[in-house]
Image (tube, rainbow, N blue to C red):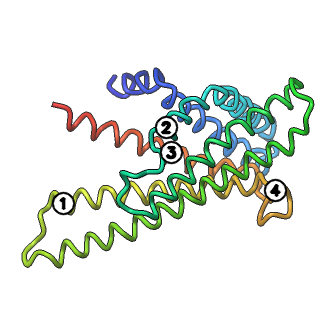
Amino acid sequence: MAALSGLASALESYRGRDRLIRTLGYCCQLVGGVLVEQCPARSEVGTRLMAVSAQLSHCRTVLRLFDDLAMFMYTKQYGLGTEEEDVFVRWMSVLGNIADQLFYPCEHIAWAADAKILHVDSSWWWTLSTTFWCLSLLLGVARSLWMVLKLRQRLRSLTVAFTSQPPWSKRRAIKVQMQSEVLTLLSNLADLANAVHWLPPGVLWAGRFPPWLVGLMGTVSSLLSMYQAARAGGQANATTP
């Protein structure tokens, strides 16, 4: 009952519902892609799962039509990141926010073109939106790598600073933050692999992933995101008096 209650609570929020839709969509693509490619006898089931995956992806695209304002408010609140201690992290975050902000209108125009609402070339706008997504992911990867290196240095400095065992709470806090950054890094790398795949042919490995591999990368990223969200929620509940 506790698991069902937690799932119901997550589905009440937009972010929680989006994570679940994303995970289900990529899982369907993973299983469907494997069945179509490896199990001819079950190719019909695989094709249906691929269709479900496409519909869930389209659902998320439509829901993102309403994300611009939330992203704008977040970008405005963060500003130039003057409260950020590290200059590199600050500018990676600022540039990442700009890339994310530009991604949304480009995707909206591409969606509207596919829906015959706008008479423009949708492929060009899909490419542009995917490019901004790639840029945001690259900046996120650079930020997470930098943070992991800085946290490792801080942990070593903490160990050297104390002749005896450093305070457990400080070591624990740094290790938890490092784990979070590593998970974010892995999630961004998995998404980046798919983002490059969706760029025009000729760009690195664009267009070369089979459906099941796209599903695998997306599933890994989605599960890592859900795990981090669940862990963050658990920590918040633990600290609530």
**Percent x, y of residue 110:** 80, 36
Name the front one of labels 4 and 1.
1
To which residue does mark 1 refer? 170
Count of marks overlaid on the render: 4
| For marks 2 and 1 on the same chain, the one whose residue lies earlier in the sequence | 2
Measured Cα–Cα span from mark 4 to mark 3: 24 Å
Amino acid type shown at disc 3: Leu
| Residue visible at 79% across and 33% down in the picture | 109
Q: Residues within 10 Å of mark 4 (few under 14, many from 20)?
A: some
Which numbered dot is residue 74? 2
| Above or below: residue 11 compared with residue 164 | above
Amino acid type shown at disc 4: Gly
| For marks 4 and 3 on the same chain, the one whose residue lies earlier in the sequence | 4
Which numbered dot is residue 223? 3
Name the front one of labels 1 and 3.
1
**Which secondary structure lies at badge 3?**
helix
Give the quadrant of residue 71: top right
To which residue does mark 4 refer? 207
**Percent x, y of residue 220:** 55, 50
